Amino acid sequence: MAQTRIGQDPAASPATSRGGLVKDGPSSPANTADAPLAEPRLRAHDRIALIGSRFGLIITWALMIVAFGVLLPGVFLSGSNLGYLLSSQATVLIVAIAVTIPMAAGEFDLSSSGVVVITVVTMGYLNVIQRWPLMPTVLVALAIGLVVGCVNAFFVVRIGISSLIVTLAMTSVLIGFALGLNNLTVTGISVDLVDAARSTVGGIQLVFFYALGVVVVAWYFFQHTPIGRSLYFTGAGREVARLSGVRVDAIRAGSLIVSSLLGAVAAVLLTGVLGSADPNVGTSYALAPFAAAMLGSTSFTPGRFNILGTAVATYFLATGITGLQLLGLAGWVTQVFYGMALILGVALSTFAARRNGRTNRA
Amino acid sequence: MNSTNQEPLLRAEHLTKSYGARPVLKEAYLNIVSGEIHALLGENGSGKSTLIKLLAGQIAPDGGYTADNAPCVTVSGRSEGLPIDPKTAERLKLGFVHQDLGLVLSSTVMETLGLGRYRTQWGRISWRAQRSYTEETLRRYGLGLSPDAVVGRLSAVERAMLSIIRGIESISGEERGVLVLDEPTAYLPADAVHQLFEVLRRIKATGSSVVFVTHRLDEVKDVCDRATILRSGEVVATMDVASATTDDLITAILGTELTNLYPSEHTTVTEPVLRATNLSGAETRDVSFVASRGEILGLTGLVGDGFEEIIGLCFGASRGEGKVEVKGTEVEQKWLRPRRAMSMGMAYIPADRATSSGLMAASAAENLTMATMRRYWRSGRMAYSEEHKDAIEAMRRVGLRPLAPDLPLSSFSGGNQQKLILAKWLLTRPHVLFLHEPTNGVDVGAKKTLFDLINRAARDGCSVVIASSEYEDLAHLCHRVIVIKNGAVSGELTGDQLTTDAITHRCLASTATPATS
């Protein structure tokens, strides 16, 4: 009986042989052909572990908010503080989304802080010192992002240098140019831009809603388009993706270009939020976005860079820092906190990736 | 030949291991007598690799044992509890060649062979002595490599040979040792396998023994004296190979009889689908051939002679020259990319699953629809439920277990991974299907399913081109086999000429020193 089935239908053969392996008896057909999703069944504590790893970040975040709310009654959970928290991190959020995109494709874009600095300084220089109108200034600013992205992409994809090296060097180049252009803080940025960024709706600055828009669009691309799938395939196994018809070089180049462009967008908004062009803004954008992206990759879809994770992690980190500062810890805590969060984020994401099955060797 | 009555050289007992709640090894044991080549057989997932890893001390056995059933390994009368550390393994003269070869890609051949046993002079490494030792060793095994060659630049075959040599060297010396080889022949061509077997026989003659994990039963019949068979984590039999037939072995491995491994042939019509003209690449020059509708065409030769390269050239996976034509659409090879090849109706499954054909971390469904994902992109969204449904359907069609499209590919056995990858490409409904060593590291049961699937695809009108050095599989499966030698077509076998011996003969004929070239 079993033999004839093997002979006839290839689909049935492993099932039958497996059934024969498990038990040689009349009960074997029962656990073969038509019990599709019976295995693998998760046991209770496995399921808890899975939920824990998916939503651990959100749960920890909630606990943290409650803890600060109790420790700082009437301060931490006040409307003004929450509004400040959401608004002040909006540009960091955009940059975090920006760096998540190339990271999903297996490339690092460390130049985001450099892009922010050069764009901010250029905005101040053109709009204030050279008295350019706002629109051309913004266009030039965005063009800078585009050009930087293209240069990064050229060296990484075309020449084949590690993105880590190219973008790290690029940061130095950009910050150097920025300081050469103007190393002083310039105030008096166009009121239109300031209004566009700083007007509030329900106590929250508009810039937060722009960031939210970026999150939604990026999430849509990641989750619901073949481009998002291709990004993931490229990052998880470039050769496999290439041989399956994914345009891996275009994906890698595109991700680096979009990343720099979004960095420039964040910088334009930042200039509006601050109302000035400060060449020293870069430090906030050097580490925080990567810490958020890494930490974010441990949740929702553990082991994969994902937009929702990055967004939640950005605010998770900001909540921690704001809370600690309100508790009276001085400014140094920011640096320590982000540094530690990055290491922890990488450690956890390595762990998550390992749990979720090995990644392919490059 | 077999000397079962004598005291075993190696005895491993009470090997029990579970991953979570899933037992993979239950009270398994291994007895190896002096001077034998001992096969360790079993389907994928039967516990072979776990047993080897326990022996090597890479993983620890389950706890909760008593003094009576403590897991231990005894070599030459010296007993050690498991897990053992690498130093102890060295002292017991236990050598291992693992499936992943365990090589450091950035190191040189000399460093690889010297690892852990450098020749020193007054406390510092004597590089001169090291070099002459390396050169002498390479010569002894007929491997024409420079001691300074970087491991990462070597071919898969050379790497495998290097790792095996290191394993053999680690047990050489006065005392008798045991060398454990985990599927050493998976990446080796026929001539290198022969060479390896010669070496194994030499080891055996010195009184040392070899444990040999393999899927290839003809190799077992060829060199092994005894075989231990694992099924679902338990040792089901230890048999004398000489007195067992291949069918006996298969029955023991599967626990059921397997009728006719190879599907029956079917006739083809001569309607050319694929036409390759003057293909040249790194190892080939001016290769031309035609493949017809419904035909299974084999490309073979000795590894290094270029037959493996041709299908990659046809698919645009690597760059070369020449022309490729599918169903009337002709493209210059140098402009051909995988994407273009796919749109022309080609599908290509490379040999190395882990790096080239499957994404281990991605789910089964994502792997399945990787080449066809645009189908699920409608009105601005990915149609997930439909993708899920199609994935289950495709998995059912190729008999995949477990039928869980959300599990990562890495949680499937090697045979099931290969079936899944084949299913992925069959979803593209190819006119031409290229396969490179499709049964690498695949157990007998899965192999039969793969052959049936390949045959069915051909019957449905697909033209299948298989590049492989498994001469026996080619002889049974193919309608026609083209032999490549020194990068050019050297002959073609069809009909009654198409036998394992004939292919082997054609491949080896008039090749002076195949291994060293």
Image (cartoon, coloured by chain):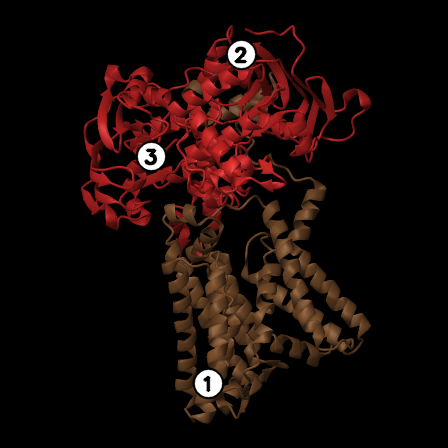
Chain colours: A brown, B red
Where residue A51 sits: x, y (%)? Answer: 67, 51
**Quadrant of res A36:** top right
Q: Is residue A248 above or below residue B473?
A: below
Instruction: Decide if residue A219 is on the left or right side of residue B122.
Output: left
- The image quadrant where one finds the N terminus of chain B is top right
Mark 2: amino acid:
Asp
Instruction: Decide if residue A46 is on the left or right side of residue B292.
Output: right
Q: Is residue A93 above or below residue A107?
A: below
Q: CA distance from mark 1 to mark 2?
A: 80 Å
Q: Name which residue lies at 52% across and 75% down.
A: A210
Where residue B465 sits: x, y (%)? Answer: 30, 32
Residue B225's mark? 2
Mark 1: amino acid:
Leu
Q: Name which residue lies at 22% across and 27% down.
A: B490
Of mark 2 and mark 3, the one earlier in the sequence is 2
- Is residue A19 at least partly visible in the picture? yes
Depth order, front residue of B278/A217: B278
Badge 3 crowding class, 10 Å Cα cut-off, few under 14, some 14 to 19, many 20 or more, is many
Single out the residue that lies furthest toward the front: B122
Determine the secondary structure under disc 2.
loop
- The image quadrant where one finds the C terminus of chain B is top left
- Is residue A1 at least partly visible in the picture? no
Q: Name which residue lies at 29% across and 41% down.
A: B282
Badge 2 crowding class, 10 Å Cα cut-off, few under 14, some 14 to 19, many 20 or more, is many
Q: CA distance from mark 2 to mark 3?
A: 33 Å
